[in-house]
Amino acid sequence: MNHHKRIKTYSMLTIIVLLMIVVAASPGHAQTYPEQYLEEALHNNPGLLSQHKAYEASMEQADVVSALPDPQLNAGFNIPPMKRFMGDQLVSLELMQMFPWFGTLGAQRNAAEKMAESQYQQYRNQRNELFMQVTRMWLEIYQKREQLGIIQEYLDILQAREDLIYTRYESGRQTSGVALDVYRLEIKVAELENRSDKLNEEIDALVHNFNLVLGREKTAQVSTPEELSLPTAPSENTDSGVFTQNPMLARAQANLEATEIRERIASLDARPMLGLGLQYTWFAPGDAQMGQMDGGHMIMPMVSVSLPIYFRKNRAQQKQSQLLSEASRFNKDNQLNMIQIQWQELTSRVKNLQHDTRFYNRQLEITLKSEELVMSGYSAGSEGFNDLLEIQDQLLDIEWRLLNSRVMHQLSLAEMDMLLARRVFE
């Protein structure tokens, strides 16, 4: 890449960062999120699948707590038979069904449904954190591959500098100077090749871990775009309740509503339970001389009432429910505060990254101009080869900083999307 083209490229990057234009490009050319890999993680990540099963299990709890208590069956056998007026009593069966106070079962179902909602929001939060992890790893792979490309570009540039060395010493004099500059060049090339080898190792490790998170083959290929498309920065006013879709805030709200319902359940538990039942008794024919009858069957309706006489226990349960409701309310407020703090930190970070990008582009433009002057000076004999290598190091460092700024900008906007639960985090 020639110097004028590099200046033009990074000037365009400045415009993109400042205006935050979303580039509409074909898949694989410019991307915002690795949506294909997010879909794979959604279906294959074992941690996320485990969380979803826990949510499904919590949904069943509503049917458990809203059902009537199991009926109780008591059976009695008289051995020897008990002498009764109707005859010899042999068998007695008693069936009793208890009924909680009116509205208790409905309240218990509502509380269980709210807890299932809380579990679902926990699943959403874990899903979004997984999506953020996948996005972060994907961007890291992209960054290191781009760094590898930058190193290769500078290796090509340094290889071309060898011709510049021989051009300077074409008179044939100062052969020691030629050798010294060539050795310096070879040392710098070896240094960049070493960095390149280390980057390849790091990329292989990242791809391995990335595939593990996605639940697929460790050696599967991971594609990254030729360029990143920055998402638009959120412009919502954070004081207008824009975080209501945030999973952790929604979970705190569900927990609060569940504890408020449990507070009502605690007062209902202090009411008596009613029971309805039947008693069946079978009498065998008795001894007529003793005045017993010829036996028969007897069915007797029964009613029972529980007596909630332990007032201290009932008051303690109600007080406990009230305290849990207050704790949930404080937890929700604290969760909102933490989200707003994260939002403010991300907003500040994005602004700083914009400042950095403007500075690095300006620095790159000036350094490229300086490079041309140093090259001219070296050819004329007024500049040393170390000066030229130093300029190359500065250019490499600036390009790496620009790349890092762009990737960090992308990550910060993704974290803002996650707080708002929008785009892929919906």
Image (spheres, grey):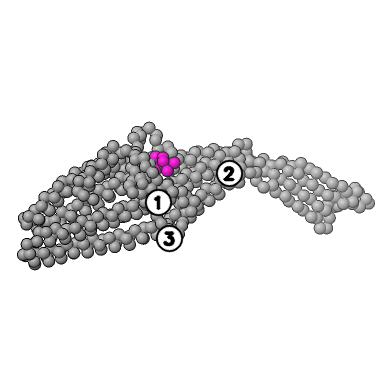
Main SS, magenta region, reads helix
Along the viewing direction, whichever of 295 and 141 lies nearer the viewer: 141
Residue contact between numbered discs 3 and 1, judged by CB atoms under 8 Å? no
Residue on which the image places disc 3? 218
Q: Which residue corresponds to the image point at 87% horizontal and 51% vertical from the top-left?
A: 284
Residue on which the image places disc 1? 134
Assign a secondary structure to mark 1: helix
Specify whether 215 is left or right of 69. Answer: left
Along the viewing direction, whichever of 273 and 159 lies nearer the viewer: 159
Specify whether 82 is left or right of 200. Answer: right
Give yes or no for residue 29 being in the magenta stretch. Answer: no
Q: CA distance from mark 2 to mark 1?
A: 34 Å
Along the viewing direction, whichever of 64 and 60 lies nearer the viewer: 60
Q: Which mark is residue 373?
A: none
- Amino acid beneath label 3: Lys
Residue on which the image places disc 2? 62
Horizontal and vertical percent position of residue 232: 34, 38
Q: Earlier in the sequence, mark 2 or mark 1?
A: 2
Q: Residues within 10 Å of mark 1 (few under 14, many from 20)?
A: many
Q: Earlier in the sequence, mark 2 or mark 3?
A: 2
Q: Earlier in the sequence, mark 3 or mark 1?
A: 1
Q: Which residue corresponds to the image point at 18% horizontal and 55% vertical from the top-left?
A: 392
Residue range of the region highlighted in magenta in the rendering: 418-426
From the viewer's perspective, is the residue at label 3 or at label 1 nearer?
Answer: 3
From the viewer's perspective, is the residue at label 2 or at label 1 nearer?
Answer: 1
